[in-house]
Amino acid sequence: MSVLMKGADVANAMKEDLINRVECLKEKGVAPCLTIIRVGSRPDDVSYERGAKKRMEMIGIECRIVELPEDIAQDSFEEEVRRVNADPSVHGILLFRPLPNQLNEEPVKAMINPEKDMDCMSPMNIAKIFAGDETGYAPCTAEAVMEMLEFYGIAPKGKNVTVVGRSMVVGKPLSMMLLKKHATITVCHTRTADLSAVCRKAEILVAAAGKARMITEDMVGEGAVVVDVGINVDESGNMCGDVDFDAVEAKASYISPVPRGVGSITTSVLAKHVVRAAEKRSGM
Ligand code: NDP
């Protein structure tokens, strides 16, 4: 029988600490504030925004939404980002990506204040992850995986860890964070030869490829910890992960579900980043 790693349990454990820290900030006259910048109304963005707003309010963080028209021009878009960046009452910024085609995100990545960059857009925060410097802000999803492992007492130190996926949002930064915790990392992608054999050797297997149920039972070693980051919709229109959960469950020692797994932790990590940004700015 495997242990089911539930995102809500991790998020609840984080909540208490964050509420206390927000209270301390407020006693010092600091009101932590997140601003979400959304261009257009993509359903994924709107749904994440709703969850994020609810989580921030639960913790006592103000959450402002800047909604911009889908067809906004580059200069107006940059002007909005500049305005939020310069607003001293804002501690953290989350910009939904991908942006519509007419917009170039490169100037914005360079422009966003690294101290307000809550989801690792800025080259400064990316560099910190790769340098093993924990003073920056990691991508929320990658950090959510680390929170999940920590909550369930799974230490990456000395373990063979395989990460399937090498994106800048999940796979690469997560690999660096696990390396920082002294794991031995293998990063897989579409050109990996004999993916099954590589995955089977993993003591901790993280699936972040975005391919519905691609991790089948034969790809998982006996007693492995399996973390599923994927969010996919299957042929029947149901949400599922990258792991064939029903087949893999019996073989794994720990396994995270989709939904109600890693995805349920990301807004708590976002809140943690905002609290940390507010603490840093106020010298706490
Ligand atoms: P990307 O599409 O940017 O990257 C996918 C990565 O997986 C690529 O590196 C790709 O390899 C690799 N890959 C794809 N197919 C295979 C395959 N068949 N075999 C081996 N490697 C493969 O996706 P993201 O990193 O943005 O997201 C990954 C998943 O995580 C998605 O399902 C996404 O929805 C989910 N996600 C979940 C979040 C959450 O809150 N839980 C937040 C962010 C993402 P290559 O580089 O060679 O193309």
Image: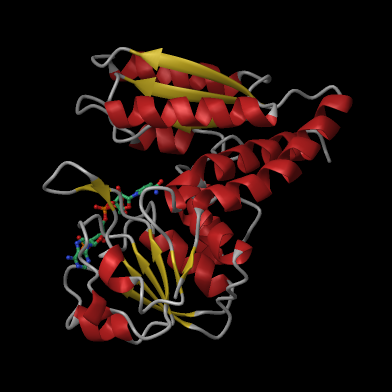
Q: Quadrant of residue 27?
A: top right
Q: Position of residue 17 (x, y in %)?
A: 75, 45
Looking at the rendered image, the quarter that the N terminus falls into is bottom left
Residue positioned 74% across, 36% down in the render:
19
Residue 242 visible in the picture: yes
How many circles with numbers are drawn on the protein? Answer: 0
Q: Vertically, is 204 above or below 128? A: below
Q: Residue at x 37, y 56 (%)?
A: 229
Q: Quadrant of ligand 1?
A: bottom left
**Quick one: which residue is furthest to the left in this view?**
235
Q: The C terminus appears in which quarter of the rendering?
A: top right
The answer to whether residue 120 shows anywhere in this view is no
Q: Is residue 222 above or below residue 99?
A: below
Q: Is residue 185 above or below residue 177?
A: below
Q: Who's the residue at 45% across and 62% down the image?
A: 174
Image quadrant assignment for residue 249: bottom left
**In-image side of 30 versus 207 (left or right):** right
Check the image and report above or below for 123 versus 244.
above
Residue at the outermost front position: 1
Q: Position of residue 74 (x, y in %)?
A: 30, 20
| Residue 132 x, y percent position in the rendering | 58, 66
Q: In the rendering, at what x and y percent does residue 265 appear?
A: 52, 47
Near-viewer residue (37 or 283): 37
Left or right: where does residue 73 sit relative to residue 205? left
Scheme of image coloration: secondary structure
Residue at the image point whose x is 68% and y is 19% from the top = 89
